[in-house]
Amino acid sequence: MMLTSTAHPSHRAPAPGGLSPGVRRITLDAAGTPLSALLSEPAGGRAPRATVVALHGGGMSAGYFDGQAHPDVSLLTLGARLGYAVLALDRPGYGASAPYLPTGQRLLEQAATVRAALADAQARHVSGPLFLLAHSFGGKLALALAADAPPDTFLGLDISGCGHRPAVSAALLGRGARTGLRRLNWGPLRLYPDGTFSEVAAVVAPMPGQEIESAQEWRGLATRLLPRVRVPVRFTFAEHEAWWRQSDADLTDLAAQLSAAPRVLIDRLSGAGHNISLGCAARAYHLRALAFLDECLDTGAPSAER
């Protein structure tokens, strides 16, 4: 299902820079470092079936998962309507933690910080099993979290905008739009609802220096981390994804690297650029991701699929 580029007349888009109805801001304690987050929960005080932990990519914020250009873009509102809590974190070096971590953290350090934040979230804010839904650098973080966790910590991982073989050098990060980052990060601008780029200032954020350095180390880290992931994993590659190689051979090798995962799915999404969750294809992607979560909750799901 694709959104049109203009909101349906029966819907009123949220105010610029605001949050969608039912979404609230919270702050988590990550062993002394504050991590800001957005939280949505099922209406009526219903207990969530699970909690979706959403991890944004480099140069974005938690607001990536609560897009304001069209009412149907927000993962936070869709997840709550379908009975899930959705917790979108500002990763270390973003949001409330930025003054404490002005240069950010490298990937494995972020994993330790987020692990502490999730313990606080489970103690004070959310219930039910955890499922990681992650984009771009957040996908690397999700894989790092799962690689070092007992297999019952997370139900599964759903990752977009992240692979294991770069198509371009990560050294381009931090060099500005003149290097072609706009094309890499967005793809054709027609893939996004009207108003996306007037709202996006509330979503983008500077990418911290240590994170940029860590991004350049991913290929080697992936070789170490992927074989240690022991939960189901689903990858989505946008039609206009330009950061990652995605030939059939590349994706077959990606699945093979996840040798301990009981299930690996790889999907392609037409009509989408790198920033899938802000695009016209966002609702279709989010529905597929939540369907995968449903399968992970179902203990009768197949034990292996590649």
Image (spheres, rainbow, N blue to C red):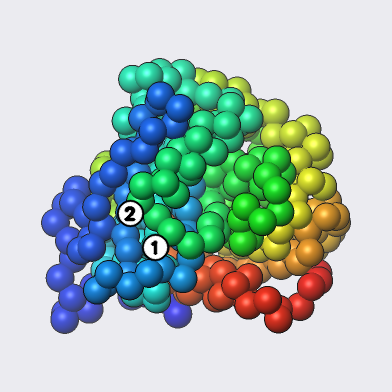
Mark 2: few/some/many CA within 10 Å (<14, 14-19, 20+): many
Q: Position of residue 186 (x, y in %)?
A: 46, 51
Q: From this viewpoint, which residue is outermost toward the front? A: 123
Q: Position of residue 52 (x, y in %)?
A: 47, 59
- In the drawing, what numbered circle is on residue 258? none
Q: Position of residue 199 (x, y in %)?
A: 24, 50
Q: Quadrant of residue 241?
A: bottom right
Q: Position of residue 161 (x, y in %)?
A: 58, 52
Give the position of the C terminus as an image quadrant.
Answer: bottom right
Q: Is residue 96 above or below residue 151?
A: above
Q: Amino acid at mark 2?
A: Leu
Q: Earlier in the sequence, mark 2 or mark 1?
A: 2
Give the position of the N terminus as an image quadrant.
Answer: bottom left
Q: Between 263 and 284, which is closer to the camera in this rendering?
A: 263
Residue sitting at 81 percent across and 39 percent down? 223
Q: Is residue 121 visible?
A: yes
The residue identified by callout 1 is 85
Task: Give the left or right position of residue 11, taking residue 37 as reference.
Answer: left
Task: Give the left or right position of residue 261, taking residue 298 as reference.
Answer: right
Q: Between 90 and 200, which is closer to the camera in this rendering?
A: 90
Q: Between 247 and 11, which is closer to the camera in this rendering?
A: 11
Could you give the CA–CA distance between mark 2 and mark 1, rounded to whole angstroms? Answer: 7 Å
Residue sitting at 48 percent across and 53 percent down? 53
Secondary structure found at label 2: strand
Q: Amino acid at mark 1?
A: Ala
Residue sitting at 39 percent across and 62 percent down? 85
Q: Are marks 2 and 1 in contact (CB under 8 Å)?
A: yes
The residue identified by callout 2 is 39
Residue sitting at 36 percent across and 47 percent down? 124
